[in-house]
Amino acid sequence: MKRDTSEFRHNCGICLSGRAGAARVYWTEGARSDWGSVMRKIDSSVLGIDQGNALLFSDFDVGGEMWTGDGPRCKRVPVNFSEKYRSKPAVQVQIDMWDMDVRYNQRAEIKAENISRDGFEIVFKTWGDTKVARVAASWTAMGQIGYEDDWEV
């Protein structure tokens, strides 16, 4: 019996194939400059999904630049994957917690940069008069990983 998985693929990102133990995985990697996207396709039964979270900074108690500064400010936090991917994975980052001073505009941008097979950087930016006490983020990486018996040449 063949199921129509087109709606499932577009909404959820994973489409099961007819082969036992195999999945065809689709996801998009945003092209930030024009807010478009590029579809990447993987046909593999070895899909790695790695997740984690991190406190990016806590500047309130130490008088750090995110809390006391003005203008453009940026924090970068390196993340290492628990296992190396075969190729650069797709990475999604989101804010789990933010503590901001309500007397000022709340401006923030969070994204993944410098994505490689081994890891990436979580980048948090703010600007203007925004006062950020602390921020925590979580992330998910999805991509093809190797089999245990693969040979590295």
Image: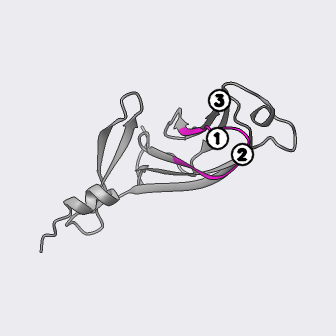
In the picture, measured across the screen, residue 69 lies left or right of residue 145, that is: right
Of the two numbered discs 3 and 1 in the rendering, the one whose residue sits closer to the viewer: 1
Determine crowd level at label 3: few under 14, some 14-19, many 20+ residues with C-alpha closer than 10 A.
some
Tell me the quarter of the picture where residue 2 sits.
Answer: bottom left
Quadrant containing the C terminus in the rendered view = top left
3 or 2: mark nearer the eye: 2
Q: What residue sits 55% from the left and 49% below the top?
A: 94
Give the numbered dot on residue 102: 2
Q: Amino acid at mark 1?
A: Gln
Residue at numbered disc 1: 106
The image position of residue 152, as x and y in percent, is 44, 41
Q: Tell me the CA gap for discs 2 and 1.
A: 7 Å
Q: Picture coordinates of residue 19 (x, y %)?
A: 21, 66
Q: In the rendered structure, does residue 72 fall within the stretch colored magenta?
A: no
For label 3, the SS is loop
Segment colored magenta? 93-111
